Image (tube, rainbow, N blue to C red):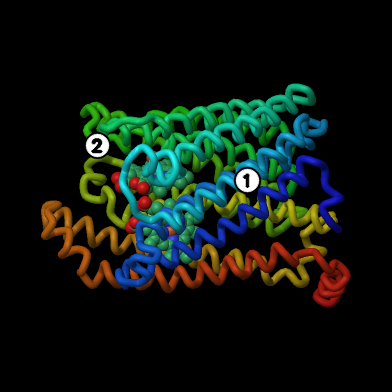
Amino acid sequence: MSIANLNGGQQLAVKYFIVAVVLFVAQILFGMLSGIQYLAPDFLQGVLSFNVTRTVHINAMIVWMLYGFIGSVYWLLEEESEIEVVGLKLGNLGFWVLTSAVAVVVLVFLFVQTGPGDDFTRWFVNEGREYIEAPRWADIGIVICMLIFFYNVAATFSKGKWSGIAGVLTLDLVALAGIYLAGMFYTTNISVDQYWWWWVIHLWVEATWEVLVACLMAWGLMKTLGVSRKIVTTWLYIEVALMFGSGILGIGHHYFWIGTPEYWFSIGGLFSALEPIPLVAMVVHAVYDSGVRHTKGNNNPALAWFITHAFGNFFGAGVWGFMHTLPQINLYTHGTQWSASHGHLAFFGAYATIIIAMFYIAAQYVRGQSSFGPALLGNGWKWKWALGLLNFGVVGMTVALLISGYEQSFIERAVGGSTWMGYFAAQIHPWFVQGMQWRMIFGLITSAGIVLLVWDLLTIGKHPAVEKSGQAQTAS
Ligand code: HEM
Ligand code: HEM
Ligand SMILES: [Fe+2]
C-alpha cells in the first residue's frame, strides 16, 4: 500500500501529481483573492495587488495542468510501451529542476511586484505575456525539461511497443513543445507580440492539449471500463483529425481586433465555429462506451470525472466558446467577463476534470486496490461531494460571470459605444456588481470542493476492510 507497488514511470508520475495538487490549491486561493479585489479594490493593495494575485492564479493553473499532463503520460508510459522508461533518472532530474524553477518564479512574482520594464525584468522577473509570464531564464529551463520528457516518451515507445495512442501522443508532444517557442520571441510591436502569443495559448488549449486529453480519455476508457483498443483508437483518429482541422485556423477568432488583416474575420469565424464538432464526438464516444458497459467500471471516481470531462469540454469550450466566436458577436463581448466566464468553464471542464480522473487512477494503485468500484463505494461520500461541489461551484461562477459579461456587452459596448464613460457605467451597474458577488459565493463552494477533493485523494482506499464492511452493510 505504497508507491513501492508502482512501476518507475508511475512513481515519477506520483511526484508530478503531488505538485499539481499543491498548485491547484494555490490557484484557487489566489483566485479567491483576485475575486475579492474586484469588490474591494483596496484589499491587499500594495501587498498583493490584483495584477499579482491574478498572475499567480492563472500561471499556477497552466503549470499545474502541465504537471498533470506530464504525470499522466509517465503514468501510462510503461504499460503502453510494455517496457521500462528509458531515462528514468533523467526524468527525475527534470522533475526536480522544473519544480525548483517553478518555486523560484512564484517567489519572484510575490516579492518583486513592481519595477521597470527592461531587459533585466524580461530575463529575471516577468516576461509579461498573460498565462506564460515566467521570465526568460525559466522559459529556457522549461524547454530543457520538456525535451527530457519528450525524449523519455519517444525513446521509450521506440524501444518498446508503438500503439495508435503512442503515435498520436508523441506527435502531439512535438507540436505542444514546439509551439511554446512562439511565446518567446522578442518584439516591440504589440500586435506582432499578440499574434505570436496566441500561437501558444490558442494552439495549446484548442489543438495540442485537446489531442493530449483525447489520448488520456482513450487510455482511461480502456483502463476503467475495459473498452477495446480498436474502438478507442478509431475514435481517437477521428477526433484528432477534426480537432486539428478546425482548431488550427480557428486561431483567427483571436485576430479580429489586434491589427491583423481583415481576412481573419472570415477564417476565424468559420473555422472556430466548427470547433465544437470534435467535442461532440468526444461526448458521444465517452457516453457510448460507458453506456455499452453499463458503467460497470473498476474505478468509479475516475470514470465519473472522465464523463464530467466529456461534458465539461463540450459545454465550456464548445458551447461557451461558440457563443462569442463570430466576429459580429465578439465585437460586443470581446474582453468582457463573458470571456472570463468561458475561460473558467473551459479550463475547468476540459482539463481540470480529466487530470482529476488520472489522480484517482493513481490513488487506486498507490493504495494497492484492485478497484474503487462497487466494492469500495460503501464509504465513498467524499469523492461524490467533491465532484458535486466543484462542478456546482464552477458552473455557478460561470453563470455569474456570464451575467456580468452580458451587462458589460450591453451597457459598455452597445449603449455606451465602447467609450470610457460606457466602461465606468458598466463597472458600477448593479448587475455587474452582483455578478461579482455571486462569483465569490460560488468561489467558496468551489473552494469547499477542492478541500474535500484533497482530503479524499489522501484517504480513499486506505482502509479497505472498513470500506468493505460498509459495503456489506448496505448490501444486507
Ligand atoms: C478547452 C478549450 C478552451 C479553453 C481552455 C479556452 C479558454 C479561453 C480563455 C482562457 C480565453 C480568454 C483569453 C484571454 O485571456 O484573453 C478564451 C478566449 C476565447 N475563446 Fe476559448 N477556450 C477553449 C476553446 C474554445 C473554443 C472551442 C472556442 C470557439 C468555438 C473558443 C472561443 C474563444 C473566443 C472567441 C475567445 C476570445 C474572447 C474575447 O474576444 O475576449 N474557445 N478561451
Ligand atoms: C475559487 C474560485 C475562483 C475564483 C474566485 C476565481 C477568480 C478569478 C478572477 C478574479 C480572475 C480575473 C478575471 C479578470 O481579469 O477579469 C480569474 C481569471 C481566470 N481564472 Fe479564475 N477563479 C476561480 C477558480 C478558477 C478555476 C477553478 C479555474 C479553472 C480551472 C480558473 C481559471 C481562470 C482563468 C482561465 C482566468 C483568466 C480568464 C480570462 O482572462 O478571461 N479559475 N479568476
Ligand atoms: Fe481560441
Spatial CA distance of label 2 from label 1 is: 42 Å
Picture residue at 46% right of the left edge, 44% below the top: 134
**Amino acid bearing label 1:** Tyr
Picture residue at 17% right of the left edge, 59% below the top: 423
The location of residue 35, given as percent across then percent down, is 38, 66
Picture residue at 44% right of the left edge, 62% below the top: 31
Q: Quadrant of residue 81?
A: top right
Given residues 15 and 242, the one toward you in this image is 15
The location of residue 115, given as percent across then percent down, is 33, 51
Picture residue at 42% right of the left edge, 34% below the top: 183
Given residues 242 and 43, the one toward you in this image is 43
**Mark drawn on residue 258:** 2
Q: How many marks?
A: 2
Q: Quadrant of residue 345?
A: bottom left
In terms of sequence position, does the residue under pointer 2 or pointer 1 come before the other?
2
Q: Can the viewer see residue 276? A: no
| Quadrant (top left, top right, bottom left, bottom right) of the C terminus | bottom right
**Amino acid bearing label 2:** Ile
Report the side of 399 relative to 41 (left or right): right
Q: Can the viewer see residue 384? A: yes
Q: From what the image shows, is residue 231 above or below residue 445?
A: above
**Mark drawn on residue 288:** 1
Tag 1's secondary structure? Answer: helix
Badge 1: few (under 14), some or many (20 or more) residues near its Cα, within 10 Å? few
The location of residue 205, given as percent across then percent down, is 47, 40
